[in-house]
Image (cartoon, helix red, strand yellow):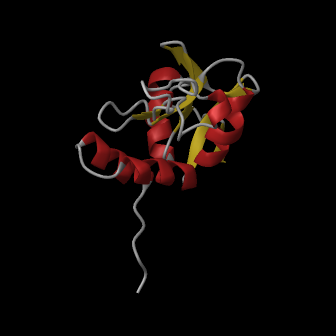
Amino acid sequence: MEQSRTTLAERIAERRAGIGDPRALVGEMRRSILLVPVSGGGLWSARSGGVRWICGFTDEAALARFALRHGPGDRPMDYAALLGARIVDEVVPSLDEPGGLAVDIADEDGSMFFPPVTGIVPDGVAVDRGVRDEEGRRER
């Protein structure tokens, strides 16, 4: 019997409903193939709150909803299919500024942001890497 696999979109829905394990969500993001629009030779991103957000989509339908609002409309949009782990482990550290991953941003009730913090991006580029509690332990 084949075991059903929880998709990233399902994990996002669980967290937005206040249930589910945040670590499972991050793990699912890392294992998922995300569609990232390509524009001008680079990956599509947006800056907000001092963070450069790489925008990824869980499927072609989510990417199409984004394209209708922010891209070429109903024309095809070029994209790269990247593993979530590659985005947060390789792409984000290559940026010259704090960076994170924004998933399904065209879906108001289905979007999720993975900020540049320890446990999501490599420690060397996490914005919270130097934060310590009163006893000198690194806060998480």
Q: Which residue shows up at 49% across the image and 53% down it?
A: 27
Q: Quadrant of the N terminus?
A: bottom left
Location of residue 115 in the rendering, given as x and y in whole percent from the top left corner: 49, 30
- Examine the rendering and report whether any part of residue 80 can be seen: no
Image location of residue 41, percent across then percent down? 76, 26
- Looking at the rendering, in which quadrant would you find the C terminus? top left
Asked whether 62 or 29 is in front, the reply is: 29
Q: Look at 51% across and 45% down and name the residue there.
A: 60
Q: Residue at x 66, y 17 (%)?
A: 97
Q: Nearer the viewer, residue 112 or 69?
A: 112
Left or right of 89? Residue 18 is left
Q: Name the residue: 50% across, 38% down.
A: 63
Residue 64 screen position, x and y as percent: 48, 37
- In percent of width and height, residue 62 lies at 44, 40
Tell whether 137 sits left or right of 99.
left
- Left or right relative to 26: residue 107: left
